[in-house]
Image: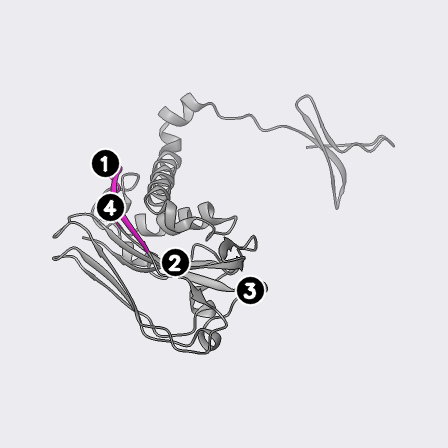
C-alpha cells in the first residue's frame, strides 16, 4: 500500500484508487476487484459461499411464503424490521435440518417449533399488552388449532394506547408446504371489547379446522388490534405500536 507524501490529503476514491486516513498517515490502495457471478458459480474456491447463498435464499423464500399465508393477521401488527427478523428466524430453523447436505438444508425438514413465541411486532409483545393466561393447542390428527382466553376484566388486563376505546383479538391457523409453495389459512376475530370496561368479558374460544392428519407444518397465531370509537363507528388507531401478533404454536411433521 502506497503512502501519500503530498500535502494534499485525499479521502474517497478516484478510478481504481482508494484514499484513506489511518493512524499511520494517509494511504492509497487499489480497489479490490469484484468476483464475477460466473466465477462464484463454478470455482471450487467458492463452494462454501454457494452453499450459504443457496440456504439463505431458501430462508428468504420460506419467509415470503409464511408472510403470504398470514397476511391478513399481520395487517397493522408488524414492525418495520419484520422481514429481516423473520428471515433470521427461518434460517435458524433451516440449519436444524438433520438429514440434508450442507447447501441443501431446508425449512420443511427443520425444527419449526423454534418459531414458537415469534413476535411480528417487536414494539408490542402480546404478553405485555394482554396480561392473562392463554391456552393454545394443535391437534394434528384432527386438524384442529385452538385458542382459549378465559374471562377477564379489560380495564385490569389490557394495556391500551392513548386514544383507544376498543380492541379485538384475532387468530390465524395455517398449514404451509414450503416445498411446493402451497398453504391453507383460516382467520377469526372476536367482537369489539371496550378496553376500559370493569366488567368481566365472556371467555373467548377460537378454533381453526384445517386438514386432518396434514403432512405440512402447522402454525397458530394470536393477535390484538386497537380501535377508537367515533359516533358509533370503530376506526383503527394510526398508532400501531400496541398492535401485537404472536406465533403461539408451530408444529413440524
Instruction: Using the image as rendered, state which of residue 77 and residue 123 is in the foreground.
Output: 77
Q: CA distance from mark 4 to mark 3?
A: 38 Å
- The 10 Å Cα crowd at callout 3, few under 14, some 14 to 19, many 20 or more, is some
The residue identified by callout 3 is 161
Tell me which corner region of the image, top left, top right, bottom left or bottom right, holds residue 148. Answer: bottom left
Indicate the secondary structure of the residue bearing disc 3: loop
Prevailing secondary structure of the magenta residues = strand
The residue identified by callout 2 is 118
Indicate the secondary structure of the residue bearing disc 4: helix
Q: CA distance from mark 3 to mark 2?
A: 22 Å
- Could you tell which of marks 1 and 2 lies nearer the N-terminus? 2
Of marks 2 and 4, the one in the foreground: 2
Q: Are marks 1 and 4 in contact (CB under 8 Å)?
A: no
Of marks 3 and 2, the one in the foreground: 3
Q: CA distance from mark 2 to mark 4?
A: 18 Å
Q: Is residue 11 magenta?
A: no
The residue identified by callout 4 is 108
Indicate the secondary structure of the residue bearing disc 1: loop
The residue identified by callout 1 is 180
- Could you tell which of marks 4 and 3 lies nearer the N-terminus? 4
- The 10 Å Cα crowd at callout 1, few under 14, some 14 to 19, many 20 or more, is few
Amino acid at each position: 500500500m502506497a503512502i501519500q507524501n503530498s500535502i494534499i490529503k485525499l479521502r474517497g476514491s478516484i478510478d481504481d484508487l482508494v484514499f484513506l486516513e489511518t493512524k499511520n498517515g494517509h494511504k492509497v490502495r487499489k480497489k479490490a476487484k469484484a468476483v464475477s457471478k460466473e466465477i462464484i458459480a463454478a470455482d471450487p474456491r467458492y463452494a462454501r459461499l454457494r452453499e450459504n447463498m443457496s440456504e439463505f435464499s431458501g430462508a428468504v423464500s420460506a419467509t415470503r411464503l409464511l408472510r403470504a399465508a398470514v397476511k391478513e393477521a399481520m395487517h397493522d401488527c408488524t414492525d418495520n424490521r419484520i422481514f429481516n427478523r423473520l428471515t433470521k428466524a427461518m434460517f435458524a430453523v433451516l440449519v436444524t435440518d438433520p438429514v440434508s447436505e450442507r447447501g441443501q438444508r431446508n425449512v420443511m425438514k427443520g425444527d419449526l417449533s423454534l418459531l414458537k413465541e415469534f413476535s411480528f411486532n417487536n414494539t408490542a409483545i402480546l404478553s405485555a399488552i394482554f396480561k392473562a393466561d392463554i391456552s393454545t393447542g394443535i391437534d394434528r390428527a384432527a386438524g384442529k388449532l385452538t385458542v382459549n382466553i378465559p374471562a377477564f376484566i379489560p380495564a385490569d388486563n389490557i394495556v391500551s394506547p392513548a386514544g383507544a376505546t376498543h380492541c379485538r383479538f384475532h387468530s390465524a391457523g395455517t398449514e404451509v408446504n414450503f416445498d411446493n409453495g402451497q398453504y391453507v389459512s383460516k382467520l377469526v376475530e372476536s367482537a369489539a371489547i371496550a378496553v376500559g370496561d370493569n366488567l368481566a368479558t365472556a371467555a373467548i374460544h377460537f378454533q381453526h379446522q384445517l386438514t386432518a392428519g396434514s403432512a405440512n407444518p402447522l402454525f397458530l397465531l394470536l393477535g390484538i388490534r386497537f380501535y377508537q370509537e367515533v359516533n358509533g363507528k370503530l376506526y383503527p388507531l394510526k398508532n400501531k405500536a400496541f398492535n401485537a401478533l404472536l406465533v403461539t404454536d408451530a408444529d413440524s411433521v
